[in-house]
Image (cartoon, rainbow, N blue to C red):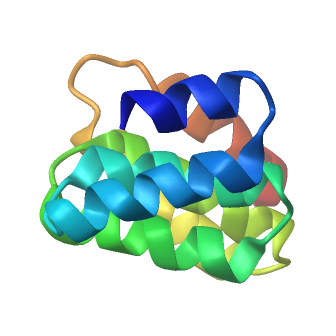
Amino acid sequence: MAQGNLAAGLKELLKAVESYLKAIQFQPSFSRAHHNLGVTYEAMNEWDEAIKAYKESIRYAPEDPRSHFYLGKVYLKAKKPSLAIEKFEETITLDKSNTFAPEAKRLLGKIK
């Protein structure tokens, strides 16, 4: 996972994808690896792959608002506003620390 983060930071996105996939193969329920894989696919404009990765992250950590928020952003980019609204609303409900909720509210306001 650390190698993936380093590669992503250096914009070596294919190398990052490979590293995250290895981490997931070793520990399939590693939610953060799925999330970071989604971030990397998003940076590559691979919306379908990013959506799959974020959904897997949510599958293993459904209470974590981070992947809900990022999935909402990808749904917006993929021109799926109704799905984005759903994810942003879930983000607001789940985000007790108010880390992602303000931006989710702002994006909701732009959609509605």
- Position of the C terminus, as image quadrant, is bottom right
Q: Relative to 3, does residue 50 appear above or below in the rendering?
A: below
| Residue occupying image coordinates x 26% and y 70% | 25
Task: Classify residue 73 as left or right of residue 55.
Answer: right
Q: Nearer the viewer, residue 21 or 59?
A: 21
Number of marks present in the image shown: 0
How far across and how far down the image is residue 72, in percent? Answer: 59, 59
**Residue 9, percent from left and from top:** 68, 22
Is 74 on the left-hand or right-hand side of 67? right
Please state which of residues 104 and 2 is positioned toward the viewer in this rendering.
2
For image coordinates 41% across by 19% down, the residue present is 99
Please indicate, yes or no, whether residue 68 appears anywhere in the rendered image.
Answer: no
The residue at the point 73 percent across, 55 percent down is 14
Quarter of the image with the N terminus in it: top left
Q: Position of residue 6 (x, y in %)?
A: 57, 23
Residue 77, percent across and down?
84, 64
Q: Quadrant of residue 7?
A: top right
- What residue is rendered at 57% in x and 74% in y? 51
Q: Is residue 42 above or below residue 99?
A: below
Q: Is residue 84 visible?
A: yes
